[in-house]
Image (tube, rainbow, N blue to C red):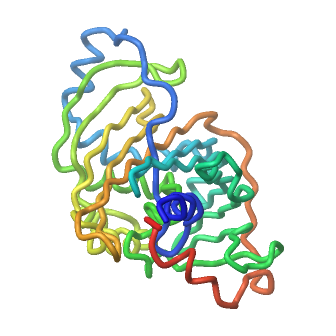
Amino acid sequence: MERRQHTRAGRTVVAMGILFGLGVCATGCAGRGAAADDAGGAADPVGALHRAAGALRAAGTSKASTAMEMATGGTRVTIRGRGVYDYRRRLGRLSVVLPDDPAGTPEHRPITELLAPGALYMKNRGAGVPADKWVRVDTATLSDGNLVTGGATDPYEAAEILRGAHTATYVGRTEVGGIDVRHYRGTADLALAARGAPAEDRAALRAAAKGFATAYVPFDAYLDDEGRIRKLRQSFAFVNGRQKAPVAVASTTLLYAFGTPVDITLPHPRDIYAGRIAEDETDDPAH
């Protein structure tokens, strides 16, 4: 029974999602910036964080790596994703890799996810969905607003959460992937973020504010000298259907190669699966 629970934890990835993430890669060396740079970073940390989403839109595109981690059934499960994002069109494409089962056998082919305003599309979804079909999920209907459901946090939505930063401190200079960055630490309010976000992002953030065990999201954000996010680690807490205590989920997003070409086309309606998805893989992320 215990092995079955661990195996299913590796498979669950939609509709109250599979969730997971831990800081991948690069934390840096000792801060190298001059004292003036440190003073500048410390002057208005909340303002710098509120402007981070706008800095991504100005950058246009980037590559992205994601990781999501949670502890379930006595084990820690991690899902990783890699892809590209167009911040002006609000479109992203990620290849999401689920963990192997406890015996080391791969559970699933990588899932292709397309991220769009108000929607998540998945291919190679499993659970009875034909291999050539996409599954479409309305993110405003998800109690987490798709911050954890797909096994990867939408990079732009992660940045929008920083609009809700109400406390933040400047930690200092460090490096991420060989790039000098300013490190900020604080807490964001999802409800406040929803009020400050563009109209197309508000519904998902409002759903998350209501659906999580707490609307407050602790974070560590690393911004480059252009104000762009290079690394963002956020912690979420939710109560699933079978556990009373909140489950902690850690999500980390890395952004790099800004300006990389991105060409994303959303699926045609005829390519979207309209049938029933097997319930045993969507009812509870912890089993």
Give percent across and percent down for residue 51. Answer: 35, 46
Q: Is residue 161 left or right of residue 228?
A: left
Camera-side residue of 56 and 207: 207
Q: Is residue 277 left or right of residue 42?
A: right
Q: Residue at x 22, y 57 (%)?
A: 216
Q: Residue at x 59, y 43 (%)?
A: 64
- Note whether residue 54 is visible: no
Give percent across and percent down for residue 5. Answer: 49, 63
Camera-side residue of 132 and 115: 132
Work out whether 64 lies above or below 5.
Answer: above
Give percent across and percent down for residue 124. Answer: 74, 67
Can you tell which quarter of the image residue 22 is in?
A: top left
Residue with the most extreme front position: 1
- Note whether residue 134 is visible: yes
Residue with the most extreme bottom position: 275
Give percent across and percent down for residue 259. Answer: 65, 39
Q: Is residue 20 left or right of residue 122?
A: left
Can you tell which quarter of the image residue 245 is in?
A: bottom left
Q: Residue at x 43, y 61 (%)?
A: 147
Question: Total number of numbered labels?
Answer: 0
Can you tell which quarter of the image residue 32 is in?
A: top left
Work out whether 228 lies above or below 283.
Answer: above
Residue with the most extreme left position: 167
Camera-side residue of 268 and 236: 236
Q: In this view, does 88 lie to the left or right of 111?
A: left
Work out whether 47 lies above or below 230.
Answer: below
